[in-house]
Amino acid sequence: MVEKIRVENLSAWYGDTQALASVSLSVHEHEILGIIGPANSGKSSFIRVINRLNDLKPQYKKQGQVFIDDKNIDAIHPEILRKRVGMVFAMPLSLPMSVYENIAFGPKRHGVRGKKELDAVVQRSLEAASLWDEMKDRLKDSALKLSGGQQQRLCIARTLAVQPEVILFDEPCSGLDPVSTARVEETMIQLKEKYTIVLVTNNIKQASRVSDRTAFFLMGELVELDLPSVIFVAPKDKRTEDYVTGRFG
């Protein structure tokens, strides 16, 4: 399999608090890597390192290296990196503007101006996020009027509009009902045909449903990384077994 992301001996701190401890792993192209673990296990810190969002935090420091297509992310301008590596957060962050302008915002920032081109980007992005049929007659409506599940898929579409290579999901269904969660999961599975996906989730069943491989983090350490059939049925590490069977976390 082609390696899209490579992480080597990654450690991270916020002041005196260590968030990650010597994490090493690879993410394959066109896979969904699920990341599970209890609160404060380093899951969100890990994906924030990948597109350098932690750089904005005071007292943050890291050791180790992260590569995208064999290029160190520290050598990539943050704005360029975040175009290549998009991120969808736990709470939908719709912009206070129309559905259309939410999608067009990123492409405009990167120099796309023609209406026909923007129209095509908006339609393509909404289709990829499984939202076009619901939104094609509501493009002028405020995005803030959409349901939570629709807003989350709109955020996915907005991420896709700038044509990333990697999409990071940070607990994208934590505030959604089961029906909306299922739609987002279906969208993620479809998206892996074109994108590489890293999914942080507190929902063990979700990780078992959608991930091609699953990583278990505990106290900043990568404990185990394997196929869901191993992680959720016959994990090698007792700590993983205790977590997925509900003995802690």
Image (tube, grey):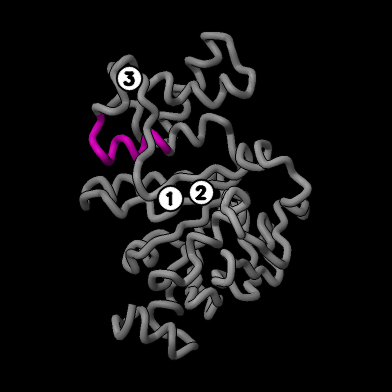
Mark 3–mark 1 distance (CA, rounded to whole Å): 23 Å
Foreground pick, 28 / 52: 52
Quarter of the image with the N terminus in it:
bottom right
The tag on residue 136 is 3
The residue type indicated by label 1 comes to Ile
Residue projecting furthest to the bottom: 238
Per the image, label 2 sits on a secondary structure element best described as loop
| Residue 154 falls inside the magenta stretch | yes
Compared across the picture, whether 71 is left or right of 221 comes to right
The residue type indicated by label 3 comes to Lys
Q: For mark 1, what is the residue?
A: 189
Indicate the quadrant where residue 16 lies: bottom right
Q: Is residue 247 above or below residue 190?
A: below
**N-term-proximal mark, 3 vs 1:** 3
Q: Position of residue 227 (x, y in %)?
A: 49, 72
Foreground pick, 235 / 86: 86
Mark 2–mark 1 distance (CA, rounded to whole Å): 6 Å
Compared across the picture, whether 69 is left or right of 164 comes to right
Disc 2 and disc 1 in contact, CB within 8 angstroms: yes
**N-term-proximal mark, 3 vs 2:** 3
Q: Position of residue 137 (x, y in %)?
A: 28, 16
Q: What crowding class fits label 3: few (fewer than 14 Cα within 10 Å), some (14-19), or many (20 or more)?
A: some
Mark 3–mark 2 distance (CA, rounded to whole Å): 24 Å
The residue type indicated by label 2 comes to Lys
The tag on residue 192 is 2
